[in-house]
Image: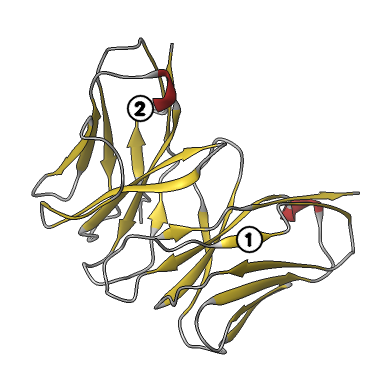
Amino acid sequence: KAGVTQTPRYLIKTRGQQVTLSCSPISGHRSVSWYQQTPGQGLQFLFEYFSETQRNKGNFPGRFSGRQFSNSRSEMNVSTLELGDSALYLCASSLAGGFTEAFFGQGTRLTVV
Amino acid sequence: TQLLEQSPQFLSIQEGENLTVYCNSSSVFSSLQWYRQEPGEGPVLLVTVVTGGEVKKLKRLTFQFGDARKDSSLHITAAQPGDTGLYLCAGAPTGGGNKLTFGTGTQLKVEL
């Protein structure tokens, strides 16, 4: 059974640009959550999607957005990149909408220069 | 806002020693998960504890969920270099959903 796949693994972007990250969950999993991990703040919840609807949202500015497709694949977008957006972005896949165990992808390392 | 404090933040020990990592909160969680993360990789789920007072053993690792479901501990017996990594606890909300609150992390290094 394939795990959670995130693409790309690494990205370098310039301040002011936008970026789109992709996440393919484990087959059969319908919930996808996104997290940002930085050395100073640790792992912080961005948002969760279930059945193409955003169910929960963390405390991040509106520059961070996401969506989920009918096949449960998800994308997150960050517009007008800032240096502070440099981080490891992690996607977690869960079976259902109520709490179930979360399985993480390898992450996308975003560097903003 | 739910917060999870882990202690210690850093731990450097010799192979064969025992250690305990603590995860504490003032909030109640429906369940608590423990992860281990290697540099540049995503966290890997080790265990989920659901019931207050629950104890789970995974080879040399023992996990306990507090009676009030506000805290947890991870005990490693006879640590090995392969145990080196960042250990994270994560609490699931009582109201449902998959919004995990992560602990501050414990960086463990086990030396030969």
Q: What element carries label 2?
A: loop
* Residue in the picture at 51% in, 73% down: B26
Q: How far apart are marks 2 and 1 (CA)?
A: 31 Å
| Label 2, residues with CA under 10 Å away: few <14, some 14-19, many ≥20 | some
| Label 1, residues with CA under 10 Å away: few <14, some 14-19, many ≥20 | many
Amino acid type, label 1? Gln
Residue wearing tag 2: A8
Q: Do the residues labelled 2 and 1 touch (CB within 8 Å)?
A: no
Total numbered circles: 2
Q: With B4 as the anchor, is B30 left or right in this view?
A: left
* Residue in the picture at 10% in, 51% down: A52
User: Residue A89: x and y, percent?
Assistant: 40, 37
Q: Check the image and report above or below for A16 versus B72.
A: above
Q: With B64 as the anchor, is B8 left or right in this view?
A: right
Amino acid type, label 2? Pro
Chain for disc number 2: A
Residue wearing tag 1: B6
Residue A13: give its label: none
Place residue A95 in its image quadrant.
Answer: bottom left
